[in-house]
Amino acid sequence: MANNADIKFNVDNLELFYGNFKALKGIDMEIKKNEITALIGPSGCGKSTFLKTLNRMNDLEDGVKVTGRIHLDGVDIYKEMDSITLRHRVGMVFQQPNPFPKSIYDNVAYGPRIHGIRKKSQLDEIVERSLRQAAIWDELKDRLNKSALGLSGGQQQRLCIARTLAVQPDLALELKKDYTIVIVTHNMQQASRISDKTAFFLLGELIEYGETTELFANPKNPKTEEYITGRFG
Ligand SMILES: Nc1ncnc2c1ncn2[C@@H]1O[C@H](COP(=O)(O)OP(=O)(O)OP(=O)(O)O)[C@@H](O)[C@H]1O
Ligand SMILES: [Mg+2]
């Protein structure tokens, strides 16, 4: 079944229950090697739940039950692999929600600088673009050199989104040469720009899954269309 060399994950009729609540309903998905897969869908539809099943982060919690199968390179991760080996092979990166005790500008420029970008004009451009994408540029453009710790909670959250956006898209494109990447995003521009495949979830079901360009240009399911046009529009 999952022995095809191009397939990294083969998910077969996966269901996950939190107590009596079925959070994932019969998910089937093949995730190809060296591709970026974006999980999209409204809040509460099961994106994080699904992502966590890929390295068994949720089934050890009380009251959580998983049925179905997930193969990683042809090996059943629930039956044939110990969790240490699994977690060495499948990493999870969560968005860091706290700003650094630095200026707003330096928070956003932090990642790009680590990746060797030094030119002021280039950093200025990344900072502005990222803050705009996080919908906080207008609020912050006149106080970029002030401490990020002086921002409200909601502003800090959006700053952290900007900080992730400043590196993540290009970093992900760089990483996929060596890794297979699954991301959760609410940002349709980001999903359509960097991912190869997109999976649209709704109320625990995988509604549509396919080539990103195809799914955005020509959604097959009206629910997909409604979601992506609503999120873009
Ligand atoms: N530990 C838990 N115990 C009980 N129910 C949970 C638990 N975690 C998530 N759920 C429920 O499972 C469903 C899916 O949640 P999940 O966190 O996967 O959604 P999501 O798509 O990641 O949402 P968001 O976009 O808001 O992050 C929701 O109805 C949520 O309330
Ligand atoms: Mg989530």
Image (tube, rainbow, N blue to C red):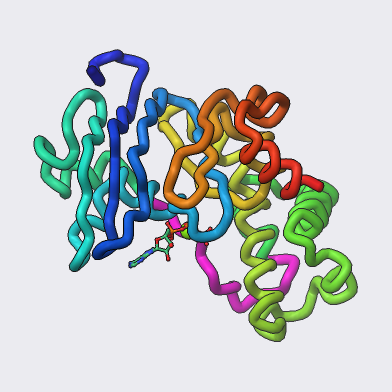
Count up the numbered dots: 0
- The residue located at (77%, 79%) in the rendering is 146
Residue sitting farthest toward the top: 4
Question: Is residue 221 highlighted in magenta?
Answer: no
Give the image location of residue 34, x and y in percent. Answer: 44, 25
Side (left or right) of 34 relative to 143: left
Front-lying residue, 223 or 166 = 223
Q: Quadrant of the N terminus?
A: top left
Q: Quadrant of residue 152?
A: bottom right
Front-lying residue, 232 or 121 = 232
Q: Quadrant of residue 63?
A: bottom left
Give the image location of residue 160, x and y in percent. Answer: 62, 65
Q: Quadrant of residue 58?
A: bottom left
- The residue located at (55%, 34%) in the rendering is 198
Give the image location of residue 29, x and y in percent. Answer: 38, 30
Q: Magenta residues: mostly which secondary structure?
A: loop
Question: Is residue 103 highlighted in magenta?
Answer: yes
